[in-house]
Amino acid sequence: MTAPTLTPRQEQFLHHVADGKTTAEIAAQLWVCEGTVKKTLTDARRRLGAVNTAHAVALGFRAGVLK
């Protein structure tokens, strides 16, 4: 089974979530709106087949997508 692929932006956002940052904190740090963060994380969850963001982070690490 091949590891799912994420865009660099999706990986970046998931790394921030893995660091414990909130949607608002990610948006402020990256100069984007919270809606962009939410949409990007939703897309990442779908690609990984995750049920929520925490699950997406776990799957990302397990698949080697996040390091």
Image (tube, helix red, strand yellow):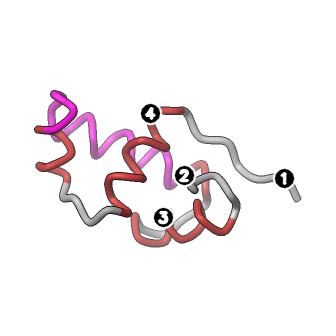
Amino acid type, callout 3 = Val
Q: Sequence order check: which comes first, mark 4 or mark 2?
A: 4
Q: CA distance from mark 3 to mark 4?
A: 14 Å
- Whether residue 38 is in magenta: the answer is yes
- For the point 15% across and 32% down, the residue is 33
Q: Which residue, given by chain and number where applicable, does mark 1 sit on? A: 2
Residue underneath mark 2: 46
Q: Nearer the viewer, residue 15 or 33?
A: 15
Q: Nearer the viewer, mark 4 or mark 2?
A: 4
Q: Position of residue 64 (x, y in %)?
A: 68, 58
| Residue 58 x, y percent position in the rendering | 53, 71
User: Which disc number belongs to residue 57?
Assistant: 3
Q: Quadrant of the N terminus?
A: bottom right
- For the C terminus, the image quarter is bottom right
Residue that mark 4 sits on: 9
Residue flagged by tag 2: what amino acid is it?
Arg
Q: Residues within 10 Å of mark 1 (few under 14, many from 20)?
A: few
Sequence order check, earlier mark of 3 and 4: 4
- The mark closer to the camera, 2 or 3, is 3
Q: Earlier in the sequence, mark 2 or mark 1?
A: 1
Which residue is found at the position 16% from the left and 28% from the top? 31
Which residue sits furthest front? 67
| Residue type, numbered disc 4 | Arg
**CB atoms of marks 2 and 3 within 8 Å:** no
From which residue to which does the magenta span run?
29-46
